[in-house]
Amino acid sequence: MGIITPGQTIVYNRGVASKATGQAVTGDTIFEIGSVSKTFTATLAAYAQISGKLSLSDKASQYFPTLRGSRFDSVSVLNLATHTPGGLPLQVPEGITDIVQLIAYFRNWRPAYAPGTYRTYSNSGIGLLGLVTAQSMNGDFATLEQTTLSAGLGLHHTYLGVPQAQAGNYAQGYTMGLNPVRMTAGVAAAETYGIRTTAADLLRFVAANMRMLDLDQQRQQAITATHTGYCQVGAMTQDLVWEQYRYLVGLPDLLAGNADKIILQANPVTALDPPLPRATMC
């Protein structure tokens, strides 16, 4: 459990990192953080925008010649970052084993909705956001995430692939039946759910998003940009991957925003024009 106070961060550890060995959780324990990884991808995309490498209004097809002439001529980077490209599936379809196959799938994809009109939470869409970002920066996503983002934010124990030297600190996950399990590697895993990190590093990432760190101007601008609201889904405002609510927010609205309907179904959105600055949100 991590706590941030002005000028101080505290992490409390409890339990074991492995039921088999009984190894205690410590400050060095590395955890899988799942889809929180998407907020890292959004931050890297915002950093690319601040750096002049891409614009949120750019079409996704600009960065992949194979997608030119496809429906992605009408899908913007902003659509990808707000889950509004038109109904991409939640998961990368079965049988797709590499990026070439994924881009070929996108080439033949047919949207169910006009871009910007419906929100459909999608790993495949955020995966493409990460790929577009990497293309705009002329690099590999995993390398850029580690060197440009994590290292630049002072996250020195945050990984997309746990180094062998840190393997002993990697917490073991378990299924509902308490069987050992690890996060499954797959196409676009790095961009959507692949981050492993310590509680202290994740707490530092939270502090960065609360504007509590002394960061360089570009990275701070990028983080701030991810908290701009672009469309409304019920009481929830969709930012760049992040989801925000007006303060004070009631429990029913929080429950509705985390219900299966929002996660698994298409929901109409109301575009915010102009976008909602971070200062008016919580």
Image (cartoon, grey):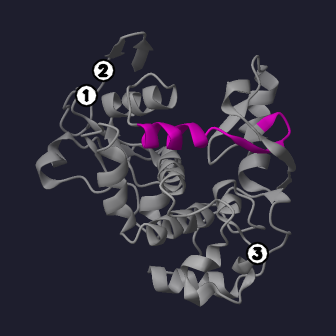
Sequence order check, earlier mark of 1 and 3: 1
Q: Which residues are magenta?
A: 217-236
Task: Residue 147: give x, y in percent of width and height.
Answer: 29, 53
Inspect the image, locate mark 1, and give the three-letter code of the amino acid beneath it.
Answer: Val
Residue sitting at x 78%, y 68%: 86
Q: Is residue 95 visible?
A: no
Residue sitting at x 63%, y 73%: 60
114 or 15, which lies in front?
114
Cα–Cα gap, marks 1 and 2: 6 Å
Sequence order check, earlier mark of 1 and 2: 2
Please give left or right for residue 50 compared with residue 251 in the image: left
Residue matched to label 3: 74
Residue matched to label 2: 13
Question: Disc 3, disc 2: CB below 8 Å?
Answer: no
Q: Secondary structure at mark 1?
A: loop
Please give left or right for residue 202 compared with residue 116 in the image: left
Cα–Cα gap, marks 1 and 3: 48 Å
Task: Residue 193: give x, y in percent of width and height.
Answer: 47, 54
Sequence order check, earlier mark of 3 and 2: 2
Residue matched to label 1: 25
Q: Is residue 23 magenta?
A: no
Discs 1/3, front:
3
Inspect the image, locate mark 2, and give the three-letter code of the amino acid beneath it.
Answer: Asn
Question: Disc 1, disc 2: CB below 8 Å?
Answer: yes
Residue sitting at x 27%, y 29%: 16
280 or 103, which lies in front?
280
- Position of the C terminus, as image quadrant, is top right
Label 3 packing within 10 angstroms: few (<14), some (14-19), many (20+): some
91 or 84, which lies in front?
84
